Amino acid sequence: MEIASKYNPEEVESKWYNYWMEYGCFISKPDGRKPYTVVIPPPNVTGVLHMGHMLNNTIQDILVRRARMKGFNACWVPGTDHASIATEAKVVGRLAAQGIRKQDLSREEFLKHDWDWTHEHGGIILEQLKRLGASCDWTRTAFTMDESRSESVIKVFIDLYNKGLIYRGIRVVNWDPQALTALSDEEVVYKESNGKLYYLRYFVENEPERYIVVATTRPETIMGDTAVCINPNDERYHWLKGKRVIVPGVGRAVPVIEDEYVDMEFGTGCLKVTPAHDVNDYMLGEKHRLESIDIFLDNGVLNDHGGRYAGMDRFDVRKQIEQDLTDAGLMERVENYTNKVGYSERTDVPIEPKLSMQWFLRMEDLAKPALDAVMGDEIKLHPAKFKNTYRHWMENVKDWCISRQLWWGHRIPAYYLPDGNIVVAENAEDALEQARRTTGNQALTAEDIRQDADSLDTWFSSWLWPMSVFGGVMDSENEELDYYYPTSDLVTAPDILFFWVARMIIAGYEYRGKKPFENVYLTGIVRDAQGRKMSKSLGNSPDPIMLMEKYGADGVRMGLMMAAPAGNDVLFDESLSEQGRNFCNKIWNAFRLVKGWEQSEVATQPEASALAVKWFGYRLDEVKVELDDLFSKYRLSEALTLLYKLFWDDFSSWYLEMVKPAYGQPMDALTYHSTVGFFDQLLRLLHPFMPFITEELWHALEPRLQGETIMLSYLLDPQEIDKDYLRRFDRTCELIAAIRNIRMSKNIPFKEKLVLETAEGHDSTFDAVVIKMAGLECIRPIVEKSAASASFLIGTQEYAIPMGALINVEEEIKKLSEELAYQEKFLASVMKKLGNESFVSKAPEAVIALERKKQSDAEARIATLRESLQQMQSGK
């Protein structure tokens, strides 16, 4: 293979991705191997690739590619989520631009537009993931509303309903006035907002001179008040017991009730109770049998219960009622107030607590196995700090509101009969048959039954994802599911730990009796260099496609991963991608260097090369062991950093320099083949992180057959490592670096051969390497150092290099004298500290030990400097 002078990511990436696809390299089928399974967190069909997707999918790809190379049957299942609220909002917006209103269309007509949108936009993000190098089995691409997934969703709903776990009831729910649908608690984002606290006067019925003051942040809801509540222990309001008060501006009398729920310290200690528009008020209303008055239409406009404010938007009413109550003398005062207001996660509008008939799933009993699984580490969270968050959610779990007032989604399979009863069935035909059977009325027709108009919460389909991607969840003879489930690793963001992760665990135990995955890797949030969360509004989120076009996919992957410690936020800067591209160039140039060497079958292997080959073999195996440990702990950023240093420092800066043949000379075949073998192993270790350049160079390294790929080659297991050899070689590298420093400080060119003098105790095993790498004439043991020599220590071993005519003796004496004076001054400061009885008696042992180490090191340096200075002066 001809290797280009420069690395061209664009050409290489498209070539190899097409190659992998052509030869089905990503496809997984059940076989005798142990499976390694990952299911993609399905991105919304409305979405395009952003930096969070880049991070998440890069991590998944690294894990999947490494598993393949470890011999597992790796299966990474891709897919998308239908995203009910987001997609319906997009379609409604597009229709509005065409002058079409949703309410003017039939359900079937509207759904046709939804499907058109999905077919048009749904595959965009998956195609973008291919640019990243994602090695998904694309033949398994799933969609949460495709036929197979939909069948599982409906069957699971029916099963849970038949078990008595799904029920229908009127509750106060989180209502999105823009999307016109209920939301679960987890779909509400609380933001700190600057508002007001309004103190309203509620006059006592039949006592026109007496009133109480009630504080509220939402005066527009007073039309829905059905009581005022006081704490029975609050002595200030004992006189109110059994009385009624007049709702200000409304004129309606409501009872004063007593409940210890009321916080006597907040506001005035009196609470207005609006059961239809506050969850806690609703519970008070149920307990005290209060009437619930719903004052809002679905769009946040007040209905007829709003009296003179009917037809006005809720926030317009808030402004108007403040003025009206002030004019009527019913406003005690208004204060600025900061509180947390719930916003819809999808539409970013303030939610409205609202009474609504909805479908719910009982969660308390279902949640117990899922809680135990994580707390007992049957399922491991990485990092483990998220276990506390998980436990808090699961111990305080509420029934899940699973219905949404949307058309786009899985329609609830409930059918209403003429007598008001409900049957639940997979389709209208089954529902009619069941209706006839349960009622005994064989004359019933399809026109007599009506399907519920609501759709299921999007998460009700995605909680089945690890099972449904392999076929029917309720299919007891699903061989694919038996083989691939439970999956291995789930990579996702902490913000959907309850939304999605916990619910998948719940579903797994309910329908397979086992966990859905072994490990959950929780990524951090990608932030800019200033620590700000990336967003379109701030304009600080780079386009991943443009980044890959500029730096190459491998460069961007590497830049992201170098800054991505598990569970911690990623401070991303474009310079990281530049660093990744530079590393690609380093690998490319190192490869061109190696392949540019000629080899000789008759040349004898130099001793330095033999030592280097032995050392790097041990070093490579040492890194393999460290990598296995880091991957087992999901410390992928550290794993990449380790490989980066191995290639850049150990291999390029040291090994290749050690074995490089003299200019114009060939390399012996033994060293050459060892070097090529090392390069092969390095490419394999790097491949999960940098798939494209490693594939390109692996094919250029040796002749390959059509269909062969580095991604299906095995990672070789480490052999037995001689730790002592590695330790001694590290000391040798220190020696070489010290000699090079002397050359640099004294401006001695490398072509000027030096002599290294060693005292007794020098390890001569690696002398051939030192001579070559340090540019030495020889290494000779001596009893006494030569005059005018440069002395230094490696550990406690003393070395010297005779300078002779290589240096200006007067200048060298001056330098040594200055360094000696500095060291003596430093030693004096250390001895003063150690001579201080107060310091020695109070300081920790580790601090004392450190000071004594400073003392011994300084004394050794001073002795060496004095000896060098004496020799310089005697040799003048």
Image (spheres, rainbow, N blue to C red):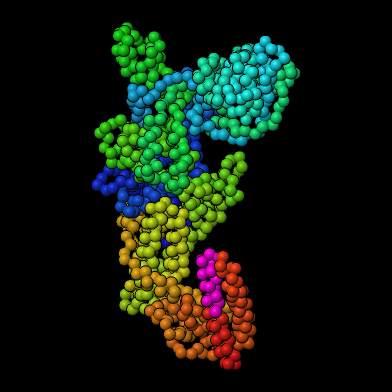
| Residue 862 percent coordinates (x, y) | 56, 81
- In this rendering, is residue 761 above or below 692? below
Residue 20 picture location, percent across and down: 37, 49
Is 572 situated above or below 503?
A: below
| Magenta stretch: includes residue 850 | yes
User: Is 152 located above or below residue 652 in the figure?
Assistant: above
Q: Nearer the viewer, residue 682 or 26?
A: 682
Q: In this view of the protein, which residue sits in the foreground, 696 or 48?
A: 48
Locate residue 151, reporting x and y percent: 34, 28
Quarter assignment of residue 509: top left
User: Quadrant location of the N terminus?
Assistant: bottom left
Quarter holding residue 832:
bottom right
Residue 534 shows in the view:
yes
Question: Which range of residues does the magenta coloring cover?
Answer: 843-859
At a point 28% along the width and 41% down the height, the residue shown is 483
Q: Is residue 4 visible?
A: no
